[in-house]
Amino acid sequence: MIAPGYHKNPWWAAILIAAYPLLIPFSRSAEIPLSLLAITGMVLFWRQNRAIKRWPTSRALLLVFLCMWLPMAISSFDAFNPSGSWYHTLVSLRFLFAALAMAWLSRFTAVRDRAMLLISLVLGFWVIDSLIQFVFGVDLLGYPNTADRLNGPFGMRNFRLGMILAVLSPILFEQVRRSWGGWGLLVVIPLTVFVVILSGVRSGWVIIALAVPLFLFWAARRNHWPLLRLSIITTVGALLLLSLAWQTSPLVQERIELSMGLGSGEIRATDFALSNRVPIWETSLRIFRAHPLNGVGIDSFREAYIVYASEDDPHIANNGIGGYHSHNLILETLAVTGLVGLLGLLLAARIMYRLWHQADACSRQSMLPFALALILLMLPFNSHFSHYGTFLSSVSWWLVGLWLGAFRRRE
């Protein structure tokens, strides 16, 4: 059988899992480990068919996947871009097998612990590399600051560092907690917050602002630490680094001043603060009203945007194309897959919520960093990337696989 081989030699499985975040900064290179995981999942399903079918976790994974995938297929029948919609729907099947492989492999504690360590080393490298870029103006890979923005190993054009580091930060924090305890967190958390702030990605700011208190609350309860003292020290450290970011980065100053418009109550100021998101949201609602049941299909938002945008839409005036996606999880779900997609999203959330409550106390501790990362990734706020795009879909199913791998049902 294959499984005992993984158990005896867990490093290669852990390396395969951790290779995905390692290659995220390098364009589509992350598809390589994801494809290898999908192939591994297919081989596992062929060789371990009976064991996998009897495994409760695989049934949960299939249900969650169908909740997300069936609305994509249903929306493709009358999509604005049928060929693109069907293509993305069919190639999304690889996420099922990749998540199955990760769940099956990481159910072994040895694999999961090593994968956590390697993933944390990758995230730690992002933080250290970005700090080197801040101090010396160039990172270890030779990338300079771009428009006063830290982007570390992500290079000159791929501005994803702040958002993805904020989302995956609970994994880094949990590994630091296990290895160095509270004192390690007092160092790592402020430095991570500092890098996320200087990345200039405001969605990352929102995510890290939620990630830190949520993780600290859980860690303090788990270790019987004085939560107030830990929070105060961490907050003071983060504020000191925030003031340093304010003084040294014109981009951070501009983004903070831009965000001040959110509290004005004026439509124009709010829209300006949200980088002209309001017209995209209004057009998304028009698309949904016109196609309420199953939306306009995956990879069809741009085609539909041209049809339903207002005559004075600023995005069409600027680029002739309009919005690429809704920049909001709920609105994108409604516009692209309609009420069927929203129902599927809610059912998937319900299934995962029930699994969490069925897990025993030990597995919940292992599941928590992945669960928290998934919650942060799915925040129904202003989002920087498309929910149905390849990047966020890959990250989502990668996290789901690790989350399910740590699951153990309560006796």
Image: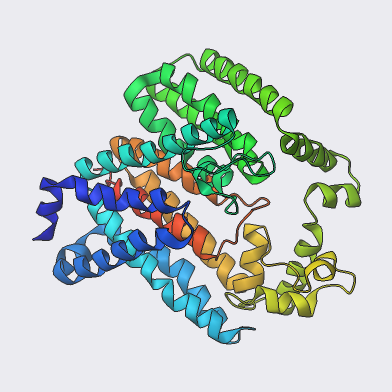
Quadrant containing the N terminus is bottom left
Is 352 positioned to the left or the right of 247 in the image?
Answer: left
- Nearer the observer, 54 or 197: 197
Mark yes or no: residue 60 visible: no
Count all numbered tags in the image, as a single digit: 0
Relative image position of residue 297 (x, y in whole percent): 59, 78
- Nearer the observer, 371 or 85: 85
In which quadrant of the rendered view does residue 301 lie?
bottom right
Relative image position of residue 273 (x, y in whole percent): 81, 46
- Nearer the observer, 157 or 293: 157
Quadrant containing the C terminus is top left
Q: Residue at x 58, y 41 (%)?
A: 144
Q: Residue at x 53, y 27 (%)?
A: 191
Report the colour scheme: rainbow
Q: Is residue 365 above or below residue 58?
A: above
Q: Is residue 183 above or below residue 295?
A: above
Mark yes or no: residue 14 visible: yes
Q: Residue at x 15, y 51 (%)?
A: 6
Q: Residue at x 33, y 59 (%)?
A: 33
Q: Is residue 3 above or below residue 113?
A: below
Is 46 positioned to the left or the right of 97 in the image?
Answer: left
Is 370 positioned to the left or the right of 407 in the image?
Answer: right
Relative image position of residue 404 (x, y in whole percent): 33, 51
- Nearer the observer, 389 or 221: 389
Relative image position of residue 221 (x, y in whole percent): 43, 23
In which quadrant of the rendered view does residue 205 lie?
top right
